[in-house]
Image (cartoon, grey):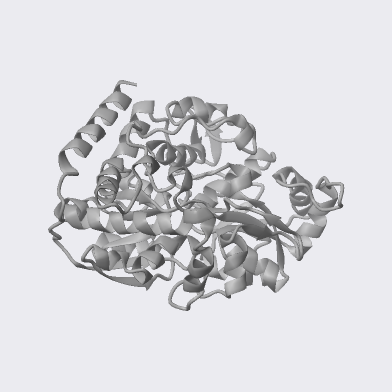
Amino acid sequence: MKTLRAIALATTSLIATSASAELLDLEKEDLTFGFIKLTDMAPLAVAYELGYFEDEGLFVTLEAQANWKVLLDGVISGQLDGAHMLAGQPLAATIGYGTEAHIITPFSMDLNGNGITVSNEIWEEMKPNVPLMDDGRPQHPISAAALAPVVEDYKDQGLPFNMGMVFPVSTHNYEIRYWLAAGGLEPGYYSPQDISGQIGADVLLSVTPPPQMPATMEAGTIYGYAVGEPWNQQAVFKGIGVPVITDYDMWKNNPEKVFGLTKEFAEENPNTTLALTKALIRAAIWLDENDNANRPEAVEILSRSEYVGADYDVIANSMTGFFEFEKGDVRPAPDFNVFFRYNATYPFYSDAIWYLTQMRRWGQIPETKSDDWYFETAADVYRPDIYLNAARLLVDDGLANEADFPWDSDGFKAATPATDIIDGIPYDGRTPNAYIDSLPIGLKSGQIIVDSEIQG
């Protein structure tokens, strides 16, 4: 806890000394940002289309990237000045898992926004195991326990059960693993010698880029997937699959993407970093203000080919407060996409720590780390000091409301109660090792993977 207090004091000091400038003298004005074709890149598109970047004196080019690795490599090499990133990417790069580079984030892009979809064939096999409501529709959220007998049947036939996720350090990988484990299925482990993530797995997870998910499932290569929108709703519109759970129903208001840039860029261009953060905060406010009144306009922007490029109706399904599971089974989902409410844009250390606990749980972090290591790593990557400096400037300019920002936060959210998580296990970022040890499936303190076996 001493480390927690030191981090909070350092953050407070930075806020006090650097938020006083009225006019930012930009070190770099021409910037190129990368993104993947997902609806949660919306703050970038909105900041560009509504002129928020230009208001800050920034001339921004937005470039869609082929996949998450290409995007990360572009930021590290300097071809991109920053990017819409998987929250796990800055953390993994900074601790040296995969590509090594010190990436930071001053801005969290959204909460929720993902789902898990299965093919029509798998859904038909799951349905007998799914409780029904009085009106005959499936009771949500649907546990992976309904999938377990299907997976067992495939195993009995000697057939692999394949599902897709978008990247090894993606929220989607950790969410589908969480869902499977909560239903009693083993999603597999990583080791330094075997980075497939399939050690001891009941369900074999592999990487598929988000826009390719529906076609890959339709071809039969995978039987389901975890992905962000609009690629779950696309499966419904195409009639090829059924979303069985949203991440909101898995973990209410869970953290999602971040905006990432190198530590070197932020240090060499501190005012530019503040300016771009200001523009992104304004975009997030616009996306959520007046009970999502601007969402139809946002959907029109995102449907353009240079952004997400999916049909307006497909994107609108989730972005405007509804989610369709089976054809015609449309249910209210007002918080499926959250961009500013609930302090969505604040980069909480506790969010970073959750990702790190999942990396450890599944072996991407091969050995036990101290609680202090989790706190220090989170503070190396997540930068609420930059965020709050930018927020202060917006408030001083009359562009944001004082009450909308967590000025006194120590960087940690209140613990998530058991009732808000599908497995009924609460999460507190202040006790990472105790949390890891509370999860029935996954590595515990002192355990390692040796020759495809858990030891310790």
All told, the count of numbered labels is 0
Task: Between residue 137 and residue 170, name the one nearer to us.
Answer: 137
Q: Residue furthest top?
A: 2
Residue 432's place in the image compared with 247, above or below, is above
Q: Give the image location of residue 387, x and y in percent.
A: 30, 46
> Does residue 214 appear to the left or right of 375 in the view shown?
right
The residue that appears at 56% across and 37% down in the rendered structure is 453
The residue that appears at 26% across and 26% down in the rendered structure is 6
Rendering quarter of residue 369: top left
Q: Give the image location of residue 266, x and y in percent.
A: 21, 52
> Does residue 12 appear to the left or right of 26 in the view shown?
right
Which quadrant of the rendered structure holds the N terminus?
top left
> Does residue 317 appear to the left or right of 351 in the view shown?
right
Rendering quarter of residue 220: bottom right
Residue 240's place in the image compared with 439, above or below, is below
Residue 307's place in the image compared with 374, above or below, is below
Task: Between residue 127 and residue 53, name the one nearer to us.
Answer: 53
Residue 205 in sight here: yes
The residue that appears at 61% across and 30% down in the rendered structure is 418
Q: Residue furthest bottom?
A: 305
Task: Between residue 29 and residue 96, name the one nearer to us.
Answer: 29
Q: Give the image location of residue 441, x and y in percent.
A: 60, 35
Q: Give the image location of residue 271, x and y in percent.
A: 18, 54
Residue 370 in sight here: no
